[in-house]
Amino acid sequence: MPAFLPARPLDGIRILALVGEEYEDLELWYPKLRLEEAGAHVTVAGSMQGRTFSGKHGYPSTSDAAISDMEAADFHGILLPGGWMPDKLRRDEKVLDLVREFAAHGKLVAAICHGGWIPISAGVYRGVRVTGSPGIKDDLMNAGAIWEDTQVVVDRHFVSSRKPADLPAFMAAIVELLAAVPVP
């Protein structure tokens, strides 16, 4: 490999990223591109395959797959971007079941900003150290999470951050955690 190409510590890793209307543009695109750069395969799933969703700031994302067709067993982790999207997706029982399965099997559950609403509704944050948008701090605490106001919090297989400005720390933690996952 030429010296100018980055190392690919995530070869063989598969990540499910959720998308919906008014997702936070940077919180989907920065992780997706950073994960792919590190060698991971990222599947972006929305309400239907091939649908284009608009981000809060107007950047489009077309889903690779339908959430209804996704299975946690096919992935090493799930990415939950923020924006207003999580408030709608947390009403979808399939989304909640997926998050519960990732959490139950010790797989990455990564939420940033308002993305934490989804694990809250899935009931997987009780006793977990997390951060998130200050706007959902009370929701996180009421769900039994242990709130910390910092760039990134890693608690076992849960990784969380507060806002787009925290993305470098968020992604460094995710890449480090996933690089330790054994891939056959």
Image (spheres, grey):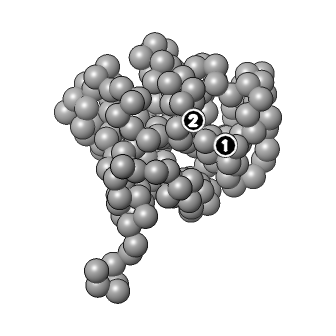
Q: Give how far across and how far down residue 145 sits, in percent.
A: 76, 30
- Does residue 20 appear left or right of residue 52 in this picture? right
- Does residue 138 appear left or right of residue 159 in this picture? right
Is residue 182 in sight in this rendering?
A: yes
Q: Residues within 10 Å of mark 2 (few under 14, many from 20)?
A: few
Residue indicated by mark 2: 106
Q: Amino acid at mark 1?
A: Arg
Q: Give how far across and how far down residue 116 sits, in percent.
A: 61, 33
Give whichever of 7, 58 is nearer the camera.
7
Q: Give how far across and how far down residue 105 sits, in percent.
A: 54, 30
Residue indicated by mark 1: 156
Who's the residue at 69% across and 55% down the image? 151
Who's the residue at 77% across and 24% down the image? 144
Give whichever of 137, 103 is nearer the camera.
103
Query: To which quarter of the image does residue 17 belong?
Result: top left
* In this view, 115 is above or below 91: below
Is residue 58 in sight in this rendering?
A: no
Give the quarter of the figure containing the N terminus: bottom left
Q: Disc 1 or 2, which lies upstream in sequence?
A: 2
Number of numbered labels in the structure image = 2
Judging from the image, what secondary structure is the residue with disc 2 in?
loop
Who's the residue at 75% across and 39% down the image? 129
Circles 1 and 2, Cβ within 8 Å, touching? The answer is yes
Q: Amino acid at mark 2?
A: Gly
Extreme residue in the left direction = 50
- Does residue 123 appear left or right of residue 44 in this picture? right
Judging from the image, what secondary structure is the residue with disc 1 in?
loop
